[in-house]
Amino acid sequence: MIKKLQRKFVLIATLSLLAVMVLVIGAINVINLVQMNGHVDDILDLLSENDGKFPDMPHRRDEEEQTIPGNAMPQEGELQGDDKPLSLGEPRDNRRKLSPGISEETPFKTRYFIVRTDSDGQISQIDTSHIAAVSSAEAKEYAAGALAKSKDRGYTGFYKYLTRETPSGSVIVFVDCSTELSTALSFLAVSAAISLLSVLVVFILVFIFSRRAIRPVIESMEKQKQFITDAGHELKTPLAIISANTDVLELTSGKNEWTESIRGQTKRLNGLIKDMLALSRMDEESYQPQWETFSISRAVAEAAAPFETPAKTANKTFFADIDPDLSFRGDESQIRQLVTILCDNALKYSSENGNIRLSLKAKGKNILLSVQNTCTTLPDGDLNRLFDRFYRAENSRSRETGGYGIGLSIARAIVQAHKGKISAVREAEDVISFRAIF
């Protein structure tokens, strides 16, 4: 139980971190791609607006240098001619206002080619002077692919294109995005690798310190188990004395309703203590069932047979449908106990003149054991709460039946010890079924 709780704690912590990392890394990479697309779109718009060329974007140093006659040098504080002081970063009047991300260096870094078509849609001109990786024939193929698409903007291979209509035809501008895409993919790979490494490191750290984190829960569970064990052993002695005293009373005064009541309650308490100790023992990590291969068909049939007579006595129908010759590897005594608990539960809580049906079937590689019974009033909500210790539905599972709400908890512990699953299912308005799958 403790190891299972520790595994759940580690798993939840790791998955939570993984979800956060996926969200953060995904958002960063999406923003990166959006910014890259926006930058390429700005270049495409700029080229298409200027007939496939970058507009003049003069450099600061391109301005005509002023000559100083002779060896005369300006003195400190003097201005030559009409010069005015120019602060760093001050825009020139002839400097074109550019979109963010586009500078004077952009024309020299951008690889692009242009295809023009006439009014009939025929290619009339191809300009590949600004790119070395694309020939005229390849540019023609790219243009045909772009024209075949319904969108005027999109990707064809590593090139993003923009189609702009002109009075004489169309101008298709292609910009090479291979560098940007490669950078984006590299960033995605690096960020994903760092995220996975971070998750792995956190997993190791959480695994190392998880036992310390759940130590209060472990201590509480260990104290609970110890209390159950101590209380069980301590209660056995007074119960044995009460039983012995009852024998003496019956020898001296004879049997009566009071001694019978004492015997009934003593027997009930002994059964409760036995079940509590068994359940506590199953919760221990060191507990292992006695594995062996046996005929589960025979074991289930023999364990269910004693319930036929009590069912007839109570005017109830008990029917068993068991596939023959089914083998199973597990603890035979516990499987018999499981069948006893489920059949006893069905007999106690089935409706008057009701039906009880036990079934053992092979389902592929699995074995399905089910016990269903009619019930006057089924509990509301999640029926799997019936497996909780000491849980009772207010109407159908009262103490008048003689139970104390721990049998189904033991049934679940037996199934889980055999790596199986058990559930309570509402078959109909008045039918409940307990299914164990191995």
Image (spheres, grey):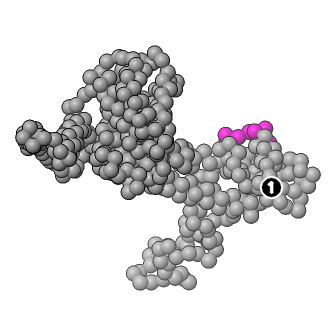
Residue appearing at x 86%, y 51% in the figure: 117
Q: Is residue 77 left or right of residue 179?
A: left
Q: Helix, strand, or loop for circle 1? A: strand
Answer whether residue 236 is visible to the viewer in this image. no
Where 252 falls versus 94 (above or below)? above
Q: 362 or 106, which lies in front?
A: 362
Q: Is residue 116 left or right of residue 409?
A: right
Q: Looking at the picture, how far across and down is residue 393, in whole percent?
A: 38, 54
Q: Is residue 114 left or right of residue 319?
A: right
Q: Amino acid at mark 1?
A: Val
Q: 27 or 214, which lies in front?
A: 214
Label 1 sits on residue: 171
Whether residue 431 is in magenta: the answer is: no
Answer whether residue 275 is visible to the viewer in this image. yes
Q: Looking at the picture, how far across and down is residue 162, in whole percent?
A: 74, 55
- Snapshot quadrant of residue 414: top left
Query: Which residues fall within the magenta stretch?
Result: 131-140
